[in-house]
Amino acid sequence: MATSAVAVRSTSILTPVVDFLLVGGLSMIIFIPILASGQEITWVTIGTVAWIQLIVNYAHFLGSFRIVYRSKEMILRHKWATIGVPLIMAVCLVYALYEARTGSQFMLAMFFMVASGYLAWHYTGQTWGMMVVFAHLNGIRHTRLEYWLIRGGLRILLVWHLMWFLKVTLANPALVEAAFQVTSYLTIAAFVMGAAGLIHIRMRTGKNPPFRGVVAWVALFVWYAFIARYGLMGLFLVQLAHALQYLEFPLRVEINRAAQQTIRSQGTQLALYVLGMLGTTVLITLFVPGPTKAVASHLLGAGPESVAPVLISYYIAIHHFFADGVIWKLRNPDVQEDLFAHARPVANTAEGAAPMWWQRAFWVK
């Protein structure tokens, strides 16, 4: 095959427009006008939002499980996340089910608190991950100062999320009201710190910070404003946005891995991946109605019959947090190869098979 000059593919995960929409653009297009209107959300019920969020949410869980459980070597490399944590939680889950039969829900409350705490860490950590990924694709590395400015601001948002969680779940929210008000004011400092970090990138490199990374960062502030304004309904809608933000990254890993196969094998592998994700998500949706039961159990005082699906839902969520913690370390060469193989310099070819339709759809131009 004749080879010509080296070409460099673009700095996208899928395409610039898809990246923009998924990492936060679409959610801001929807959330900002709603916030600006000042109106209550009456055009959709929380049950409907919960079920839509459930479908997308479990798809994003399965994306991480597909990566971490894809091979025996991967499982053994991360034994704590793939074997240790699931086994420990399984024991706790069984005990929690036994405990619920006695009328106590202490373990259920523990699962709830752990999942909620990790969720705050997860939101802010994923936003930082988006910023690092798009900086990497644009040839930018953050300095320690930029790291502490941007991520320090995200840590403030994490604390705000925890204070909000305590305020809406404690029997006496007055216990954390003062702390909640303080962290609410500190979110202004968080924005200033992050903005200073982004400006420093511009001054140091002469390049604008990657636009899609900035979109992910701004989106997180919009998300938390939405949660502060609309409470539980806001949280469900934000969780939907968070899950959408994640989905293109495991998809890109699958596309890059499929690209190592023949043209026919690539199409088959991706078709099986999509069908497997959709089918499993539908099954989980039918048998583990987590969010809707979770709302009833924790906020409306539902009975023990709701405990099993709630616990299973939290089990999957917490396991996902641990799985994510080991599969997206960009300092790991294997992770870089899986996520960025499409963005490496490649040789143009004078001849060869034309790309199939799905390659053209996902090809980064």
Image (cartoon, helix red, strand yellow):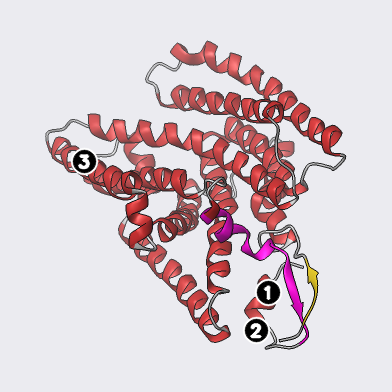
Q: What residue is disc 3 on? A: 304
Whether residue 95 sits left or right of residue 171 in the image: it is left
Q: Earlier in the sequence, mark 1 or mark 2?
A: 2
Foreground mark, 1 or 2? 2
| Residue type, numbered disc 1 | Ala
Foreground mark, 2 or 3? 2
Disc 3 element: helix
Name which residue lies at 55% across and 62% down.
Answer: 253
Q: Earlier in the sequence, mark 2 or mark 3?
A: 3
Residue numbers of the magenta segment: 334-350
Q: Earlier in the sequence, mark 1 or mark 3?
A: 3
Q: Quick check: is 215 in the magenta stretch?
A: no
Name which residue lies at 70% across and 22% down.
Answer: 188
Name which residue lies at 33% across and 50% down.
Answer: 82
Nearer to us in this view, 185 or 82? 82
Label of residue 361 in the image: 1
Q: CA distance from mark 1 to mark 3?
A: 48 Å
Disc 2 element: loop
Whether residue 315 sits left or right of residue 182 in the image: it is left
Q: Position of residue 193 (x, y in %)?
A: 72, 24
Q: CA distance from mark 2 to mark 3?
A: 52 Å
| Residue type, numbered disc 3 | Pro
Compared with 193, 225 (above or below) is below
Label of residue 45 in the image: none
Q: Quick check: is 340 in the magenta stretch?
A: yes
Disc 1 element: helix
| Residue 299 appears in the picture as rendered | no
Q: Position of residue 174 (x, y in %)?
A: 46, 13
| Residue 244 appears in the picture as rendered | yes
Q: What residue is disc 2 on? A: 356
Compared with 282, 289 (above or below) is above
